[in-house]
Amino acid sequence: MSDAAIPPETVDSRRVARGLGSTILARMGAVVEIVAQPLYVLMFGLAGYGMYAVMWSTINLIENICDLGMTSAMQRTVPKAASDADAAEALRTALLFGVGPCLAVACLISLYAHDLAPLLNVAEQDEHLLIPAVRIFVWTLPLWAFVEVATSALRARMVFGAEIRLRIVWEQIIRLVLAGLFFFLGMGLKGLFIAHIISLAITAGLCVRLLRQYYRLDLLFAGKWWGDCARHTLLAGLSVLPSNIVARMFSESPTLILNQLLPGAAGASASGLFTIARKLSSVVQLVRVAFVYVMAPLAASAERTDRAQVASIYSYAVRVIVAIAFPLAAVIGGGRYSILSLFGKQADVAAAAVVILVFARALEAMLGISLPVLQVIAHYKHQITASVFGLAVAILAGRELVGPLDPITGITLAMAIGFVTMATIPMIQLYLTENLHPFDRRFPRVIVVVTAIAVTAGVVADVVDIAFVDEVAIPLIIAIGAASIWTSLRLALPLDDRASLGKLAVRLRLVPPGTPVQ
């Protein structure tokens, strides 16, 4: 890789589709994680799984605060780096300010574990595990921060598929295998915590190998330690930190709130139930996350050369998101009881939360793709507005809803209202400040066709959910979901959108025979 300036590449729908395909494969680790959850509940019980979920949510929330926004910062600075030295400077800054504070906080939590651990509500039989579990599990904090910064650095180099081995093979499957092994060795819930930290340590080691392929790591200890690139990286991170924190709070804080609202095993079980609902909704959220990962560096690259490219990929992304996310949400919502049966009949309590979350995530996916575009092309000051309003709306909604509704449903609905609000505001800001919006003349037809397909698929899934036993209903629901997404892509998207999917469009017959693909 030369230090010479890198010529800009044309950024179009095909470029987005290439990155998207690799990123969706990389993020399939989230699907592996969903499959693992019923096994964890089976092995460790709902309350034990709830304890693990609360501790992992706490780690995620702390990491998102203490990484100072470095995982987002590199999406803005590395694509604009003129040389390997500048890219290494950005990476060094992200590692120092992203991992360093997490390491310091982990030391403090380990030191004061005796005072902090009793703040969590757990089942009586798990109380003896609290303090040693906190002292062990807290070291996932710096490891997770390193993995997040490292994989963000790879995405900033537009290497979207590099996370496949990390997210699927190591971080999820190895964790599940180790947890199962330790369980059969009689280690109980402690084995799950140990399995988690080992899988993260392996992932961190593999990250170093991948970084060596795309960055000059020898330059990490050479050159200026505080140049323009370092300063811009820190500023970019701090500018998006509030929105990152709020987004993570919407994801993780309900688990902690439910744990505190209900005493003992009830608090742990409620946290486990919400986590189950959140994991199921993450199938829909996967669509948005994949596009966010791709859009941030590509929008930054496109902005260097032609604002029209940004508008084009912005509109394309929204059309494809709508075509996938809404049918998927409708099918999961319709088949909720059969899907929840995988976690045992006790999980039926989370049915309302599943419906709320999957449709809210679909809306967030459509509206929220504006956020990475805003982060890389707009002024820093615009990025905190959505976070402040979204959090305020969620708090106000929570005050009104938690009383009349049960705790899980009330908190879930309040959170959903908040993060949909937070996703909407950046889209409005982009229109008002940059005159950018994704709703071109082709969008109305797309949304009408997708809505018809989603409603039909949701009704059919609901009928299957009621009419068949779970063992039959679950494979049928999966088939309905796949068929509805294919139908939506085939009938709703314009031909050039489908053609941008390349050979995949031909294999899936999304385009007529003989259609040239990009």
Image: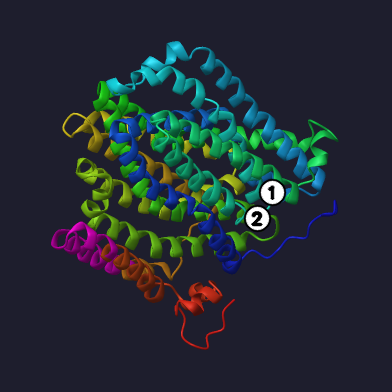
Asked if residue 439 can be seen in this view, the reply is: no
* Res 69 → quadrant: top right
Which range of residues does the magenta coloring cover?
450-475
Camera-side residue: 177 or 471? 177
Report how many numbered discs are placed on residues in the image: 2
| Above or below, 436 relative to 403 | below
The residue at which mark 2 appears reads as: 159
Q: Secondary structure at mark 1?
A: helix
Is 369 left, or right, of 408 in this rendering? Answer: right
Q: Residue at x 18, y 34 (%)?
A: 405
Q: Residue at x 55, y 76 (%)?
A: 503
The residue at which mark 1 appears reads as: 210
**Dot 1 alpha-carbon crowd within 10 angstroms: few under 14, some 14 to 19, many 20 or more:** some
Asked if residue 158 can be seen in this view, the reply is: yes
Could you tell me residue 103's position as x and y percent?
A: 61, 24
Q: Quadrant of the N terminus?
A: bottom right
Could you tell me residue 383's position as x and y percent?
A: 53, 39
Given contact means CB atoms under 8 Å apart, are the residues at marks 1 and 2 in contact?
yes
Q: Residue at x 68, y 52 (%)?
A: 157
Query: How is the rendered protein coloured?
Result: rainbow
Q: Secondary structure at mark 2?
A: loop
**Chain-order first, disc 1 or disc 2:** 2
List the single residue furthest toward the front: 185
Q: Amino acid at mark 1?
A: Leu
* Res 452 → quadrant: bottom left
